[in-house]
Amino acid sequence: MQDALLSPQDAVLARRQLRRRKLSAFFFVAPLLLFLLLAFVAPIATMLVRSFHHPVVAELIPDSLAALSQWDGQDLPPPEVQAIFASDMKRLAAARLSGKLAEEVNRVEPGSSSVIKSTARKLRRLEDAQITAEAPALLLEANKKWGDPKIWRAVQQAGAVYTPRYYLTALDMEWGSEGLQARDGAKIYVDLYTKTLKIALIITVLTLILGYPLAYYLANAPSALGNLLMVFVLLPFWTSLLVRTTSWIALLQTNGVVNSFLMGVGVTSTPFEMLYTQFSTVLAMTHILLPFMILPLYSVMKGIDPSYLRAAMSMGSRPLPAFFRVYLPMTLPGLSAGALLVFIISVGYYITPALVGGTDGQMISNIIAFHMQQSNNWELAAALGSLLLAIILLLYWVYDRFVGAGNIQLG
């Protein structure tokens, strides 16, 4: 419409200026976009891909897996297939890669690591012609487990390039003879997810109970006193997280400050076991995350005119009903932001549960770190992390759908 009111030359000039402004705006935000791409999008995409893409075994023994693809998985593989596999084992032993194959197959069939390593060492000393001609007998001589189709199925399963195996493990499930079924033993990861969400919810409720009245007092206190108290709220951010966490060890340990005080005043004759428990994890994380609840609440409460509450009481309402019907609904945006922030941070917390939680206070993030740093099972760690991300997104969608700011109605 505007171009129609301009001359052709002016319209062309206006479009050029508009493109120039858009290009300038893009260059201003390009560093931020690049940072988001490198720091968030790329790592998350890598984690998602790695949780189901695992070509390690396929790269180690491609010929054996190609031969095993024609095997029905019931009886032992044909002699020619075993010969190809034995040749691959000798090649890996010479290249000192048999340990990697043993590690990968052992994740599918525990106990097969020693079988593969010992077999590879014995085959390494044999001639190629002998291995080709006598492969089944040589494998059985090396270890009797090669006579069980189970270990061959494990090799075949470990060689899958794309597999849901790690997601099934993260859900304490597996493919059995009757299809999808629960894994034998305790539900390790499902229980950890449940405990993590429970701890995060408890921490969110505790920070809300402690933070709401404090934020209310800060918002309505005189300016000098309010600013001074706000310094104390922000003071923990000036201290290392590691220092704040380790200070709880000094407070909660058996001979720590808290137990020494309780025994000194006669409350107990024996020290309480507070450290390395779920209680210590909740207590330390509540202390650390409390400012993340106070600050959003304070920012909203500071903008609420106190006259609204006084007007409600002047019209006959009692203080408590006036608070719940007038003031509380106006603070729901800050309460919603603070609760969401504390819950999401606490779900993925790692340092504090690792230092003060012990076995009882561990969360799913500690197990993810264990598989990345110690067991070197990055694929399972990626699957656990992907499921945690999916759970958080689902909970956020439910929260936004039913409790989000768009559903808040005042009055």
Image: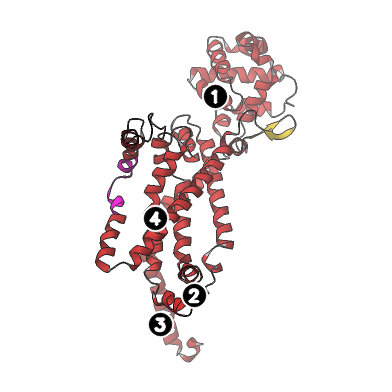
Query: Circles 4 and 1: CB distance less than 8 Å?
Result: no
Q: Indicate the amino acid at tag 4.
A: Phe
Calculate the distance from the C-alpha at mark 1 to the C-alpha at mark 3: 66 Å
Q: Of callouts 4 and 3, which one flags the residue occurring earlier in the amino acid sequence? A: 3
Quick check: 152 left or right of 284? Answer: right
Residue 30 shows in the view: no
Query: To which quarter of the image does residue 219 belong?
Result: bottom left
Q: Position of residue 221 (x, y in %)?
A: 31, 66
Calculate the distance from the C-alpha at mark 2 to the C-alpha at mark 4: 33 Å
- Residue at position x 56%, y 49% from top? 391
Where is mark 1, residue-wise? 101
Quick check: 105 left or right of 21? Answer: right
Give the structural element (helix, strand or loop) at label 1. Answer: helix
Numbered badge on residue 45: none
Numbered badge on residue 13: 3
Give the structural element (helix, strand or loop) at label 2. Answer: loop
Query: How many numbered circles does the render carry?
Result: 4
Circle 1 or circle 3, nearest the eye: 1
Circle 2 or circle 3, nearest the eye: 2
Q: Position of residue 119 (x, y in %)?
A: 57, 14
Circle 2 or circle 4, nearest the eye: 2
Numbered badge on residue 292: 4
Foreground pick, 380 / 22: 380
Q: Position of residue 115 (x, y in %)?
A: 58, 16
- Residue at position x 56%, y 34% from top? 55
As displayed, is residue 130 above or below residue 392? above
Q: Indicate the amino acid at tag 1.
A: Leu
Where is mark 2, residue-wise? 317
Secondary structure of the magenta portion, mostly?
A: helix
Q: Position of residue 196 (x, y in %)?
A: 51, 43
Circle 4 or circle 1, nearest the eye: 4
